[in-house]
Image (cartoon, rainbow, N blue to C red):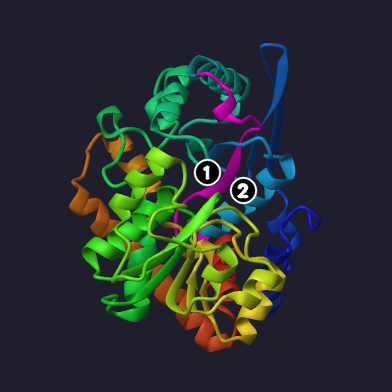
Amino acid sequence: MKNIISKIGINSLKEAANTLNIEIEKNLNPKKVLIVNIPINKTTFKGFRVQYGRPAKGGVRFHPNLTLKESINLAFLMTMKTACTNLPLSGAKGGINCNPKELSKKELENITRSFIRKIKKEIGPKKDILAPDVNTNSEIMSWIADEYGENGFKAVTGKAVNQKGSQGRAEATARGLVDIMICHFQSLKNKTVIIQGFGNVGFYTAKILYEEMGSKIIAVSDSKGATITKNRSLDPEALKKYKKENGSVKGYGTPINEKDLLKKSCDIFVPAAMENLIDSKVAFEIKAKTIFEGANGAITLEGEKILEKKNVFIVPDVIANSGGVIVSYLEMLQNDNEVYWSLEEVRKKLKKRITESYKEIKKIKNRFKVSMRTAAYMKALRKINNIQP
């Protein structure tokens, strides 16, 4: 599996394993790999599901470029993430290599249901609990739950609140991200922030920082363009409305190309788009003091080496964006006990778990003089291999 797991993942795993004096091979290979064909209207789509253990937890993404290789890499990353945050779960990932934008709602529902019928025996409350990911949402989760049948609401998380979902799930990844920022900086007031990607994570991160923390959102980009402000801060809600009406943040405020955006100095840079966007060339341009990896695998190995030489402090994805899986776990607990918590209680539980995990990783980093990513992998490997600190 070494040629399937990302280079930065393998490198971090090797460094962590060498420091702990353990073999890495047994931590690389998934326990189960599912590949199914989904024929719809003369087109056959591929469906994937990868599990590293049981019970497993992970998202379902619908994307035309989804491959088995990517599914394995993301499932591995989720395994590190659940272990890193002390959750009693292994990792999973998968989805369908389709483009939802080219499908009608009925076609999308049919594809989803067909996928679940084909993998139903290998998923469920004690096996593998599915969640939203790229291009999936609470409505798609409701289709999955319905198709699963009895106790279907326990087979997925990320459900709507009125369908036994948890309060705070939509904002969870961003909320956890900000909790870690507070832990790192103490105060976020007037901190300057640039956000790459303005989907769910990017929007909620900007919203929480702007409305609750008094931070300055100085620039935002998406796949079609970027915008920067000469005033105090961009308003995330106004920007979201503009993007909905125009299809991009481009054209709102002062336009700027992404390369020039990266050259702007800021206290915090949040990559919240897709994987591998911060390679060596991009890393060379970045002027941020700290990076909180909002997207999975946003930074490549070559990019991280350059950033480390520039003394940029990086909080890696396995802890930075773990708020989503933490609140998914909280949703599982609520479903199991049929007791549902308030938004305030969910936020409190999320903050406690994610900040405690962050502090443990910081201690490992300082003790062993390693990067935050290696320290996070060390924490994960200790849990997976039952190694006491």
Q: Is residue 328 above or below residue 127?
A: below
Mark 2 crowdedness (10 Å alpha carbons): few <14, some 14-19, many ≥20: many
Amino acid type for the residue under numbered disc 2: Ala
Q: Is residue 135 above or below residue 234?
A: above
* Residue 330 tag number: none
Q: Nearer the viewer, residue 299 or 246?
A: 246
Q: Residue furthest right?
A: 3
Mark 1 crowdedness (10 Å alpha carbons): few <14, some 14-19, many ≥20: many
- Residue 41 figure quarter: top right
- Residue 27 figure quarter: bottom right
**Kind of element beneath mark 1:** strand
Kindly report the distance in space between the C-alpha atoms of the residues bearing marks 1 and 2. Answer: 7 Å
Q: Which of the two discs, 1 and 2, labels the residue nearer the N terminus?
A: 1
Q: Position of residue 378 (x, y in %)?
A: 58, 72
Asked whether disc 1 touches disc 2, contact meaning CB atoms under 8 Å apart, the reply is: yes
Q: Position of residue 189 (x, y in %)?
A: 26, 76
Quick check: 343 left or right of 26? left
Residue 82 visible in this rendered orientation of the protein: no
- Residue 323 figure quarter: bottom left
* Residue 75 tag number: 2
Q: Position of residue 320 (x, y in %)?
A: 46, 64
Which residue is under mark 1? 58
Range shown magenta = 83-104
Q: Nearer the viewer, residue 70 or 195?
A: 195
